[in-house]
Image (cartoon, coloured by chain):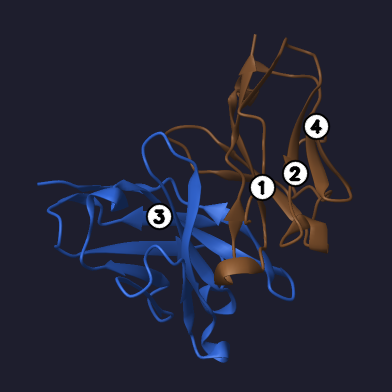
Amino acid sequence: QSVLTQPPSVSGAPGQRVTISCTGSSSNVGSGYDVHWYRLVPGTAPKLLIYGNTNRPSGVPDRFSGSKSGASVSLAISGLQAEDEAVYYCQSYDTSLGGYVLFGGGTRLTVL
Amino acid sequence: EVQVVESGGGLVQPGRSLRLSCTVSGFSFGDYAMSWFRQAPGKGLEWVGFIRREVYDGTAEYAASVKGRFTISRDDSKNIAYLQMNSLKTEDTAVYYCTRVREWKVLENYFDYWGQGTLVTVSS
């Protein structure tokens, strides 16, 4: 089954650290395909945060970091700020159904 | 500065057609594949399709949900990518995003510059 599973929501207080998991299957992350992370804020352009599991594009603060362990990948956000409130999506390649791009269901981050 | 701007959205009746445009600046358009995504109200991101560079014949791939109805094309002389949407259904209602494709590994891509999106509403 072509699924990338993310928790529907996470929350944290300003200054804290949160992690968002993205669990795949044998047709995507479990087969070694890499994961990329994006942030969506309504009314604004989606933003690439992490590519290739752990790499930060130029301009993305080092408060954002990615990690991978087996078929599970995580995005960590440290030093939470109010502006981090958004929905975060993981994305990977999937071999089933001819799909080229697969997204997780998204995780809504609330800064308390 | 890289800019990606979608246009052409609006209200359209079921069964009709609509063409979206994606105008880019700030990079060599012909050197990159381009992709379209959408987000339906209350739903997550969904890949729609992408178009390869002309050096790879400019061929396109599509999600199963739009294959046969949507067509992606590009005009490298104008720095524009298009999404032609035919036989529209109410479930095609969404914000449509255009992005630049980064070729990460064989078969694996990510998307580094996105536009703000254009809303397509399919309703009678």
Indicate which disc, 2 or 4, sits on the residue closer to the N terminus: 2
The chain letter under disc 4 is A
Whether discs 4 and 1 lie on one chain: the answer is: yes
Do residues under tags 1 and 2 come within 8 Å of each other at their CB atoms? yes
Kind of residue sitting beneath label 3: Val
Where residue A80 appears, as percent x and y from the top left, is 74, 19
Kind of residue sitting beneath label 1: Leu
In the displayed structure, does residue A100 sit left or right of residue A29? left
Label 2: element kind: strand
Task: Please name which of the two marks, 3 or 2, marks the residue nearer to the observer.
Answer: 2
Quadrant for residue A109, please give it: top right
Do residues under tags 2 and 4 come within 8 Å of each other at their CB atoms? no
Can you tell which mark lies on residue B82?
A: none
The chain letter under disc 1 is A
Task: Please name which of the two marks, 1 or 3, marks the residue nearer to the observer.
Answer: 1
B62 versus B76 height, above or below: above
Colour representing chain B? blue
Indicate which disc, 1 or 2, sits on the residue closer to the N terminus: 1
Q: Residue at x 73, y 11 (%)?
A: A14
Can you tell which mark lies on residue A4?
A: 1
Q: Residue at x 82, y 35 (%)?
A: A62
- Give the CA separation, mark 3 to mark 2: 33 Å
Label 3: element kind: strand
Q: Which residue is mark 2?
A: A23
Can you tell which mark lies on residue B5?
A: 3
- Give the CA separation, mark 1 to mark 2: 6 Å
Where residue A71 appears, as percent x and y from the top left, is 82, 50
- Give the CA separation, mark 4 to mark 1: 17 Å
User: Mark 3, residues whose alpha carbon is within 10 Å: few (<14), some, or many (≥20)?
Assistant: some
Whether discs 3 and 2 lie on one chain: the answer is: no
Task: Point out the image quarter for the N terminus of chain B.
Answer: bottom right
The chain letter under disc 3 is B
